[in-house]
Amino acid sequence: MPLNTKKCYFFVNYWEKLQSSVKSVKKQPLRLLAIFALAIIIFSFLVVMVYFASPKENFQVECLQVNEKDGNLLTVASNEQVVPLTVVLEVKDSNNKSVEGAKVTLSGGDAKDTGKTNEDGIAKLFLNATFPTGQKTIPFTVKVEKKGFERYTKHNFVLVVRA
């Protein structure tokens, strides 16, 4: 008889545990839904982080001409105060392909112009630079921006020098 009592106790205990499990399964859909929602939020966060943390390309920027002269140096007469400038520059990516639609800003002294590169990666900017009294050079800084690329900034990109 003691053996049967043990078996009976085992089955009763098992039955109680089974009933408890069934009750918790009935509550489970809400828990599963909460876990699923949390998983979606975490996955979305990871996707956004990968997107923003992904490496961006670099620009290669070259000054082709200043006032129809090759290079980035323009020499003017020593008595000139206001110098009209036409600067042609080229923007390429790290694979040496032209970058279309990049925002290009050239600034120096009191002059500033902004433009966009065309399908060949060429931008043409027009400025009127004024020499401050006693100054012999005007250095110009170029900034290039486009989504998917690191922002490019170079000081002394163009130099205008009094002779």
Image (spheres, rainbow, N blue to C red):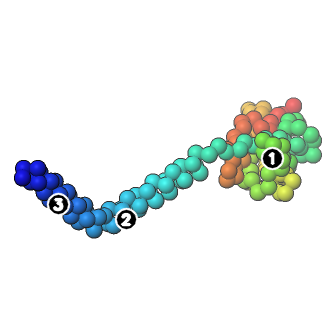
Question: Residue at 23% across / 65% down in the picture?
Answer: 23
Which residue type carries mark 3?
Answer: Glu
Which residue is labeled 1 in the image? 91
Nearer to the camera, 80 or 120: 120
Which residue is labeled 3 in the image? 16
Q: Earlier in the sequence, mark 2 or mark 3?
A: 3
Q: CA distance from mark 2 to mark 3?
A: 27 Å
Question: Residue at 85% across / 38% down in the picture?
Answer: 72
Q: Earlier in the sequence, mark 1 or mark 2?
A: 2
Secondary structure beneath label 3? helix
Which residue is labeled 2 in the image? 33
Q: CA distance from mark 1 to mark 2?
A: 50 Å
- Which is closer to the viewer, label 1 or label 2? 2
Q: CA distance from mark 1 to mark 3?
A: 75 Å
Which residue type carries mark 1?
Answer: Val
Which residue type carries mark 2?
Answer: Leu
x and y, in percent, of residue 157 in the image: 77, 38
Question: Residue at 82% across / 34% down in the picture?
Answer: 161
- Which is closer to the viewer, label 1 or label 3? 3
x and y, in percent, of residue 45 in the image: 49, 53
- Residue 85 visible (yes or no): no
Nearer to the camera, 13 or 107: 13
Secondary structure beneath label 2? helix
Quadrant including the C terminus:
top right
Tell whether label 3 touches label 2 (CB within 8 Å): no
